[in-house]
Image (cartoon, grey):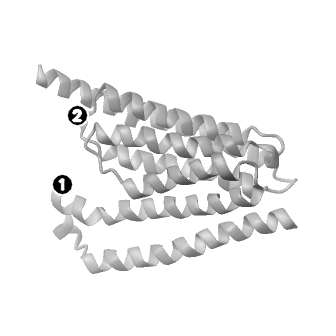
Amino acid sequence: MRAGVHQMGGKLHTLHRDLFYPAFLGAVLFEFSRSIISDWNAGIHWLWFFSALWFIAYFSAAFLSLDRADRKDFGVIPFFANFSEIGLILYISISIALVKYPESFKYRDVYFNWIAIPLTAFVANLYSNRIIRTRLSVAAAACGVFGLFFARNSLYWYIALLVVMWGLLICYFITVLEEWPHVIKNDWNYLGRLDIQRKHVDCLLNFLVVIAIVAVSFIGYLIYYNLIS
């Protein structure tokens, strides 16, 4: 009985990793790229661009998290939680991409998804033995709650919250990178063969922190400059 459950978990995990994620991400990238190409001559609206790009980047982060899931315990609950998560990402990304006038898209839709996506990810992680990055998830949901109930239609509050969300997303990727030496050593024992030293990884992470600060500042500058120009 238990073996059958484990076998089903492995199949559900494979279904997500090899079918749903590539298919959903392909649809998102198609609409995003098509919108950029069609509006290229008119110029890119940076607020619209970085709003949609955040969800696309998070899609990659969600896939990295899925890849660390316990295949044996990936049952029905994490399957549907994961499906809800990528469905929300697909919906909001394409909704932003399809907006004819980028400045007119509804901030409340973005705020709602900033709340809903961490919740679905939390359920999926909880029931598949994945690492739960509680602080980052709570911070992201808090940004969504603040935006939904307090910032509402304020353009400048939205810009500030979007920059914060980019910072949180970059921090997420950094924490994933920090797992690399442990994953390599404990799971595949490649550490010695690849001659990867911890100090080299630490230098890489410090470099990425600097890049993250610069990137978030640059995002904020582009959005603000685009709005006042």
Badge 2 density bin: few <14, some 14–19, many ≥20, Cα 10 Å? many
Task: Name the one closer to the observer, 38 or 158.
Answer: 158
Answer whether residue 31 is visible to the viewer in this image: yes
Mark closer to the chain start, 2 or 1: 2
Instruction: Calculate the distance from the C-alpha at mark 2 to the C-alpha at mark 1.
Output: 18 Å
Contact between labelled residues 1 and 2, with CB atoms less than 8 Å apart: no
User: Which numbered circle lies on residue 73?
Assistant: 2
Q: Point out residue 46 in the picture as x, y percentages from the top left corner.
A: 74, 58
Q: In which quarter of the image is the N terminus?
A: top left
Q: Point out residue 92 in the picture as x, y percentages from the top left corner.
A: 63, 39
* Residue occupying image coordinates x 75% and y 43%: 35
Query: Residue 127 vs residue 172: left or right?
Result: left
State the SS at label 1. helix
Q: Quadrant of the C terminus?
A: bottom right
State the SS at label 2. helix
Query: Looking at the image, is 92 positioned above or below residue 184?
Result: above
Name the residue furthest front. 150
* Residue occupying image coordinates x 71% and y 42%: 97
Please tell me in which quadrant of the rendered image residue 218 appears. Answer: bottom right
Query: Residue 215 vs residue 31: left or right?
Result: left
Q: Point out residue 159 in the picture as x, y percentages from the top left corner.
A: 70, 60
Query: Residue 76 vs residue 163: left or right?
Result: left
Answer whether residue 30 is visible to the viewer in this image: no
Please tell me in which quadrant of the rendered image residue 105 appears. Answer: top right
Amino acid type shown at disc 2: Asp
* Residue occupying image coordinates x 45% and y 64%: 171
Look at discs 2 and 1 and give the one toward the viewer. Answer: 2
* Residue occupying image coordinates x 22% and y 63%: 182
- Identify the residue position indicated by label 1 in the image: 187
Amino acid type shown at disc 1: Asp
Name the residue furthest top. 1
Task: Name the one closer to the observer, 145 or 117.
Answer: 145
